[in-house]
Image (cartoon, rainbow, N blue to C red):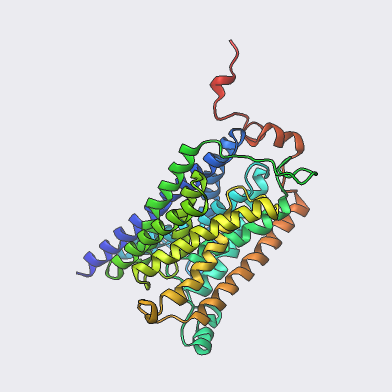
Amino acid sequence: MDALKQGTDALFILLGGIMVLAMHAGFAFLELGTVRKKNQVNALVKILVDFSVSTIAYFLVGYAVAYGTHFFVGADQLAAKNGYDLVKFFFLLTFAAAIPAIISGGIAERAKFWPQLIATAVIVGFVYPFFEGIAWNQHFGVQAWLKTLTGEEFHDFAGSVVVHAVGGWIALPAVILLGARANRYRKDGAVSAHPPSNIPFLALGAWILCVGWFGFNVMSAQTIDKISGLVAVNSLMAMVGGTLAALLAGKNDPGFVHNGPLAGLVAVCAGSDLMHPLGALVVGAVAGALFVVMFTLTQNRWKIDDVLGVWPLHGLCGTWGGIAAGIFGSTALGGLGGVSLGAQVLGTLMGIAWALLGGVVVYGTLKAMFGLRLDQEEEYDGADVSIHRISSTPDREVSW
């Protein structure tokens, strides 16, 4: 029976890892469909190479920072318990690698390639796992302190704060330090629109992310005996709540409609194991509306050129999700309880503060040492030709 349980757990979390790995294709196509045509190849290459660098950084350093576990032992030890510890690493790696994938969307169309890979290694090797260890592995006694102070630990079941808010708040200083795309904001105060280049690809990316998210959330149980259908249905309700709210707030704009479900799913991660489905619906709807409002403000009023809106989508909706777990997870609103609003607020603020510090230090250092941005001519030509020496449709450029 033990062997069967170990094998089932290994398969369960492996399937979760594969589903979240597939989400990286969603990140790629979401960015591909949003950026201009001259930057589409770069969007695809960045996500794949960032994932590869993330794997090495997390395997060699990051996983040990978060969980105190390393893999510098014999293969016989690694294969113990059907290799469960290895596939758990794979599953958690896909979460860690989401951080540079999130950042990629914010800095698209004008960022240098190699400095971003250095940033990926540092963020996945240290910045992200440092907070991951605090939230999910009891590091430094922070969770015990929060429990003493508020009565409960900080609860983040599937990473509204640990993954999404941290990724979004790291991206914010990166976007600001990088600066807006050329001619995005003119001196006369006008805003030059850069509409999505391919709505079908944008929609495909959103759908891939939505489907994979059920692995992201449900498989966060990590063992088969802890699986919860409540997590699945809450994820579903938050997804549709975010979609409908973004549809209404965004006045039928397809870019908003396809980011709405992602906003809802970001927000429900933290409390998806605690909320009533109606609570999850409300959490998702608030997130969908929040994304539309804040994306519009950042782009048009505040003139922060966050191309995919990763700070509103992941940073702010993730922040809302961390706090919402303390509200809608309470028994008073139909939740299972065992959560404290005070702990949720404090834990969320800690994640934001650490992410901002990490973003400023990493990207500020890289800007001083190597520069973050393509030069004017390279940006004008596009990252595809400037960095990868080929466009997304080279056959159209051949002269006969």
Q: Quadrant of the N terminus?
A: bottom left
Residue at (76% x, 46% y) in the render = 189
Q: Nearer the viewer, residue 203 or 96?
A: 203
Q: Quadrant of the C terminus?
A: top right
Q: Quadrant of residue 196?
A: top right
Residue at (57% x, 61% y) in the render = 315
Residue 291's spot in the image, x, y percent?
A: 54, 57
Is residue 209 in view?
A: yes
Q: Specify whether 344 is left or right of 235.
A: right
Q: Nearer the viewer, residue 29 or 264?
A: 264
Residue at (60% x, 64% y) in the render = 127
Taking the view exactly as shown, the residue that stands out farthest to the right is 187
Q: Specify whether 14 is left or right of 103.
A: left
Is residue 77 in view?
A: no
Residue at (65% x, 51% y) in the render = 299
Residue 124's spot in the image, x, y percent?
A: 56, 59
Residue 111's spot in the image, x, y percent?
A: 67, 45
